[in-house]
Image (cartoon, rainbow, N blue to C red):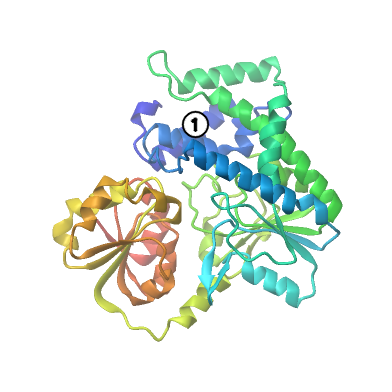
């Protein structure tokens, strides 16, 4: 299998599975860490960007001035709100999502807000840990909230003093992997540098969480996204603390955060997984007993449906969802099929991670000139779903939410539609 043949997410996933099986990458060890297992999703996105399956400009690029401002902001929060300064024994820890939604004029994390309400109601003691979003904390700080800014500075300084420790067997695996990914003609990706760097950052981060857990002694830990939190999960598993992941979006065979066809390293997987309903329980492919995959309804969407059930659909209204990494392709698909889409009144909703890209997307600029299309960023999403007769996208989580609001679905046949195999079977959308 050659990388120049990889054209979409399906190809990319199959390429990664091929590498994992050939080189036993879940057992690759550097500095006592299994960096492929711990940072698998980061590697997936990096390879995808290099192959232009995902947009290379997906992540916000900061100027030197912006980087300096962010650093001093992090440093200030680390001093004022050091998470280690006010820790005590609790029943549970909650690691919230960084993004927020406005509900009843308040910013909340829709995935953990209702959980923490239930913990308070049931008189269960807890602490909530919040990471910064684009260098800031937007939600109102509560007495049980602790900020994690300090770990971002701590790990980036501490890792500079860690020497690389890797035995001969793993050196050979790393060399073979690098040669497989790269060619003599094209230097594709410095996979050795990425894996070694990640293993060094893992060590101080793991140490930070291990101390935090020993001080708080929780019986349970709740996280929203497990991939990218390998250090916390390993620390919890090493101390025999149950760690529960709350579903935050879609997953499928081709979502590498939740799909392990071959081996997987349980050191970096949660103990239990809460899914929204039976549909999602059938889809998940984690290396854990089915009894540990538990149905836990998404209260936020249920509340929003009730809130807007009085609204009537606007005829021929269509909301289109941008998707991190492929929004330009989505816009291009609409341009190339404009004879079909001109009958709609269209709202084109960008993903929060790409608001900064609005003026850089050339195809989006073209769409904005059309009378029937309006490009938007931060809107009352559920109100728009309640009003929209149609919705369109590729594999955005919100397409599943739109079905809950009785939107008719149009799927655009682009890279990532592989995610929607079961959705297509169940909901029979129009496919462009």
**Which x, y percent locates residue 250?**
49, 57
Residue at position x 74%, y 74% from top? 120
**As drawn, is 184 to the left or to the right of 363?**
right
Q: Secondary structure at mark 1?
A: helix
Q: Residue furthest bottom?
A: 310
Who is closer to the viewer here, 365 or 211?
A: 365
**Which x, y percent locates residue 179?**
49, 17
- What residue is disc 1 on? 18
Check the image and report above or below for 18 versus 316: above
**As drawn, is 213 to the left or to the right of 356?**
right
Check the image and report above or below for 293 versus 254: below
Q: Quarter of the image containing the N terminus? A: top left
Residue at position x 56%, y 17% from top? 175
Residue at position x 66%, y 34% from top? 156
**As drawn, is 231 to the left or to the right of 179?**
right
**As drawn, is 234 to the left or to the right of 39?**
right
**Which x, y percent locates residue 430?**
27, 62
**Which x, y percent locates residue 303?**
53, 78
Who is closer to the viewer here, 87 or 123?
A: 87
Q: Residues within 10 Å of mark 1 (few under 14, many from 20)?
A: some
How many labels were placed on the picture?
A: 1
Q: Is residue 59 visible?
A: yes
Residue at position x 32%, y 49% from top? 359
Q: Residue furthest left?
A: 339
Q: Is residue 266 visible?
A: no
Who is closer to the viewer here, 199 or 172?
A: 199
Q: Quarter of the image containing the C terminus? A: bottom left
């Amino acid at each position: 299998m050659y990388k120049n043949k990889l054209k979409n997410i399906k190809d990319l996933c199959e390429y990664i599975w091929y590498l994992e099986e050939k080189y036993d990458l879940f057992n690759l060890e550097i500095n006592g860490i299994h960096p492929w297992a711990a940072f698998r999703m980061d590697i997936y996105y990096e390879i995808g960007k290099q192959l232009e399956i995902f947009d290379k400009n997906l992540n916000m690029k900061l100027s030197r001035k912006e980087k300096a401002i962010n650093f001093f902001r992090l440093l200030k929060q680390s001093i004022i709100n050091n998470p280690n300064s006010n820790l005590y024994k609790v029943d549970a820890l909650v690691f919230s999502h960084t993004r927020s939604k406005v509900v009843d004029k308040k910013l909340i994390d829709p995935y953990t807000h209702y959980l923490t309400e239930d913990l308070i109601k049931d008189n269960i003691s807890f602490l909530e840990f919040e990471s910064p979003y684009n260098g800031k904390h937007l939600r109102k700080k509560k007495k049980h909230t602790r900020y994690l800014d300090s770990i971002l500075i701590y790990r980036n300084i501490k890792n500079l003093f860690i020497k690389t420790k890797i035995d001969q067997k793993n050196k050979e695996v790393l060399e073979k992997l690098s040669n497989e990914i790269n060619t003599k003609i094209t230097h594709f990706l410095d996979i050795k540098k990425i894996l070694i760097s990640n293993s060094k950052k893992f060590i101080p981060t793991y140490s930070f969480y291990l101390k935090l857990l020993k001080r708080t002694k929780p019986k349970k830990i709740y996280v929203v996204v497990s991939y990218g939190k390998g250090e916390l999960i390993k620390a919890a598993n090493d101390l025999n603390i149950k760690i529960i992941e709350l579903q935050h979006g879609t997953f499928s065979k081709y979502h590498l955060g939740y799909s392990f066809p071959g081996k997987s390293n349980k050191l970096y997987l949660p103990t239990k997984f809460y899914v929204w309903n039976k549909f999602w329980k059938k889809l998940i492919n984690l290396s854990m007993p089915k009894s540990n995959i538990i149905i836990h309804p998404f209260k936020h969407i249920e509340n929003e449906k009730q809130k807007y059930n009085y609204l009537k659909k606007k005829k021929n209204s269509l909301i289109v969802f941008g998707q991190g990494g492929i929004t330009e392709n989505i816009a291009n698909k609409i341009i190339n099929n404009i004879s079909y889409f001109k009958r709609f009144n269209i709202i084109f909703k960008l993903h929060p991670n790409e608001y900064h890209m609005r003026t850089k997307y050339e195809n989006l600029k073209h769409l904005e000139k059309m009378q029937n299309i309006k490009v938007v960023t931060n809107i009352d999403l559920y109100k728009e779903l309640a009003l929209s007769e149609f919705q369109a996208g590729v594999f955005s989580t919100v397409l599943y939410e739109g079905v809950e609001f009785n939107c008719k679905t149009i799927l655009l046949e682009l890279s990532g539609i592989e995610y929607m195999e079961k959705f297509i079977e169940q909901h029979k959308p129009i496919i462009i």
